[in-house]
Amino acid sequence: MSIIKKIQQTECNEVTISPYIKQVSYDEHSLLLINHPTCQAALSLQGAHLLYWQPATENTPVVWLSEAAVFKKQKAVRGGIPICWPWFGKNGDPMHGFARIVDWQLVSHNATAEGVDLLLSLKNSTQTEKYWSKAFTLELNLHLGKTCTAELSSSGDFEATSALHTYFAVDDIANVVISGLGKEYIERLANENKSKIDGEMTFNQEVDRVYTQPENITLIKDGTRTIKLTHINHSDVVTWNPWLEKAKSTNDLTDDSYHHFVCAETCRINKPIKSNSQQKTSYGLKIEIIK
Ligand code: TA6
């Protein structure tokens, strides 16, 4: 049975939140399961982490979840949309910041014919002060329907780098073309996968790259469908696929998983978020299938 089916069939500590949302325990996490005529999705309250999203028009998820994902406290789940904040990568400890490994609160939820809207928040507390001394408020606005939108807003006096680290499900990485990336990039690997066409990325080895002048729209084509990723108020797009060796050495990835996902990440890395206590600073994404 797939991990998504296992999650959907969990009844542990089940609480009905609304006709379209139920809360369950899954291993050490508390999940919200969304079942709406327009889509099915799940989110972990740890990290306000959207785990998967499958619009009703699709036979497979668009936002991908690893079959070997681990649901333990303070461990980032492999897949979905991890919120990397208040730093990207190794610019602090833990890797990709602490927002994705601490518990957020569900502030509000609403449903319309178009889908389900969720507001989650994270404020500084004893659990965050272990990692970062700043006072802050983070809010995530999610819309889950025929489209998926995520907007991360922050307030407080600080500067942060961040990524909405989305894992996209693809039929086969060998057929994937990502476009709209712009020409400028920072290569993060010694063995660069030189793209044949400026602004486009294809995959035949590990790829880990920060595009620093991306367009507002990234298209991810895999030969079976086209995913349109619209970025709002971003500065960079990161593309990542671990390929075979890194997949084999990553315990929450199956060896062949690299064939079936690619990360295209909406980021604020080279233009950090400069937040202040007077107003919120936001950035985000919108995901839709265009054909
Ligand atoms: O965004 C790409 C990246 O920084 C890669 O270098 C790889 O480490 C990936 O993120 C996953 O990081 P994680 O900490 O979630 O295993």
Image (cartoon, helix red, strand yellow):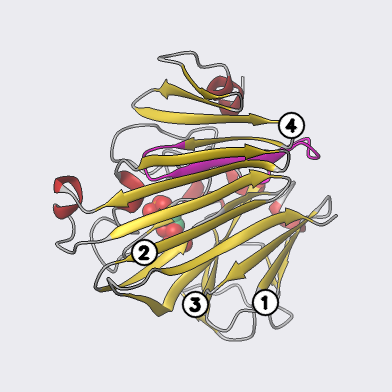
Q: How far apart are marks 1 and 2 (CA)?
A: 35 Å
Q: In which quarter of the image is residue 24?
A: top left
Q: Quadrant of residue 14?
A: top left
Question: In this orientation, which residue lies closer to the viewer: 274 or 210?
Answer: 274
Q: Callout 2: helix, strand or loop?
A: strand
Label of residue 37 in the image: 4
Which of disc 2 and disc 4 is earlier in sequence? Answer: 4
Which of disc 3 and disc 4 is earlier in sequence? Answer: 4
How many other residues sit within 10 Å of disc 4, few (<14), some (14-19) or many (≥20)?
Answer: some
Q: Callout 1: helix, strand or loop?
A: loop
Q: How far apart are marks 4 and 1 (CA)?
A: 40 Å
Residue 114 drawn at (x, y percent) = 72, 43
Magenta region, residue range: 44-63
Q: How many labels does the image show?
A: 4
Q: How far apart are marks 2 and 3 (CA)?
A: 29 Å
Residue denoted by label 1: 195
Say which residue appears at 36% left-offset and 49% top-offset. Answer: 121
Residue denoted by label 2: 154
Q: Callout 3: helix, strand or loop?
A: strand
Residue 210 drawn at (x, y percent) = 50, 74
Residue denoted by label 3: 187
How many other residues sit within 10 Å of disc 1, few (<14), some (14-19) or many (≥20)?
Answer: few
Say which residue appears at 35% left-offset and 59% top-offset. Answer: 96
Identity, as a three-letter code, of the amino acid under mark 2: Ser
Foreground: disc 4 or disc 1: 4
Residue 201 drawn at (x, y percent) = 68, 71
How many other residues sit within 10 Å of disc 3, few (<14), some (14-19) or many (≥20)?
Answer: some
Which of disc 2 and disc 1 is earlier in sequence? Answer: 2
Which of disc 3 and disc 2 is earlier in sequence? Answer: 2
Rendered position, 60 above or below 241 = above
Say which residue appears at 74% left-offset and 81% top-offset. Answer: 197
